[in-house]
Amino acid sequence: MQEERRLAVLRAIVEDYVATEDPVGSKALVERHQLNVSPATIRNDMAALEEEGYLAQPHTSAGRVPTDKGYRLFVDRLSTVKPTTAAERRAIANFLDGAVDLDDVVRRSVRLLAQLTRQVAVVQYPSLSRSTVRHVEIVALTSRRLLLVLILSSGRVEQRLVELDAELSEDDLTTLRSRVNRAATGEVIAEAAKALGALAHPEEGMPAPSAVMVDVVEALVEAMSDHRSDERVVVGGTANLARFGDDFDTSVRPLLEALEEQVVLLKLLGEATAGGAVTVRIGAEGPYQELASTSVVTTGYGPDDALSALGIVGPTRMDYPGTMAAVRAVARYVSRILDES
């Protein structure tokens, strides 16, 4: 009973401090929350929480503020992630459904996350190396020019033009399209490239491939070997850092410097988690000590075979339930869009 009451006091202090930015006193708790106990009992609970490291008192005459340990207990005791409202879901769907390609999806996701959470949003491009080949389309633009369209499970589309030395008949085009898709469709990138390579460079004793087959395979393998997207991270909402307040040198400057380093951002995002799980790293739990005044909320998005991460970075004093809900909701909608694309 006492433990539950103290959790209620901690929850109330976290909510008030996030909302007001001011240390929270017992009088304010009595006035704003229905805790059904006397102010003296609340003061005792606050003192006990402070002694256990969940609260801190900035000044002797001030109220209390949550510590990183306090935020961690608060987040861990959230029974469920706060559901998004119908209006929020409609807004997310309307904003993301207008995307025209993968780049647009990523850009819109960053803007939307930053707007919903009022934090710095970070989105990693879908990983190419873990993608599977969904389909390869080969279109004859002319009798001597082919357009290759490589469609991956991550939603990424690569296009290549191939110029031919001789004309290609409709029957030969159909055969080429069939053999390429039979070799590559459903395979992860590495295996697809290997299977296609076998078409262009068959084992000794097998019929030699046509020049067209060799040119098409080389173009597709080159498209599959472009791993730059694995390291691409897009950032939005840096203007929200103005809400950090006056502690620029200790909080904002290190974060601004971190946002310029792709490797740092990838490490901040951490390993993408499937199944809608949201990861919250608070303060010093993160990978960089100089960012100990920030928290990172992340989740995975995309199909399991091409999972990437998105999330937000912001001050430890944040609306964790709302932020976690927004991160999860955006990830779900982006996954759906990529799956349907």
Image (cartoon, rainbow, N blue to C red):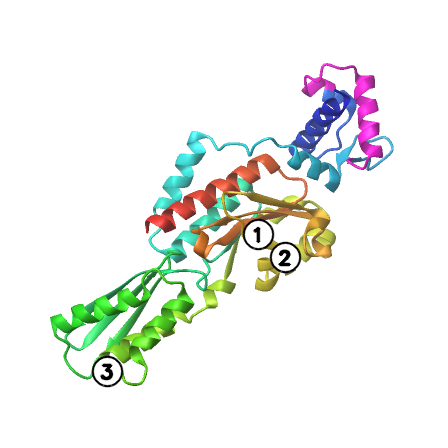
From the viewer's perspective, tell me whether residue 240 is left or right of residue 144. right
The residue nearer to you, when weighing 207 against 161, is: 207
Task: Indicate whether 63 appears above or below 329.
Answer: above
Contact? badges 1 and 2 (CB < 8 Å): yes
Q: Which residue is mark 3?
A: 207
Question: Measured from the top left, where is residue 155 in percent x and y?
Answer: 37, 56
Tag nearer the camera, 1 or 3? 3
Q: In the image as oriented, which residue stretches furthest toward the right?
A: 60
From the viewer's perspective, tell me whether residue 255 is left or right of residue 230. right
Task: Inspect the image, locate mark 2, and give the three-letter code of the amino acid beneath it.
Answer: Leu
Q: CA distance from mark 1 to mark 3?
A: 58 Å
The residue nearer to you, when weighing 202 against 98, is: 202
Determine which of the numbered discs, if any, sits on residue 238 in the image.
1
From the viewer's perspective, tell me whether residue 319 is left or right of residue 97. right
Q: CA distance from mark 3 to mark 2?
A: 59 Å
The residue nearer to you, when weighing 7 against 190, is: 190
Tag nearer the camera, 3 or 2? 3
Question: Measured from the top left, where is residue 59 in percent x and y?
Answer: 84, 36
Highlighted range, magenta: 30-54
Task: Indicate whether 265 appears above or below 40.
Answer: below
Q: Which residue is mark 2?
A: 256
Quarter-wise, where is residue 38 in the image?
top right
Determine which of the numbered discs, if any, sits on residue 75 in the image.
none
Residue 56 falls inside the magenta stretch: no
Disc 3 element = loop
Question: Considering the image in quadrants, where does the N terminus appear?
Answer: top right
Question: Of the residues under marks 1 and 3, which one precedes in the sequence?
Answer: 3
Task: Inspect the image, locate mark 1, and give the three-letter code of the amino acid beneath it.
Answer: Thr
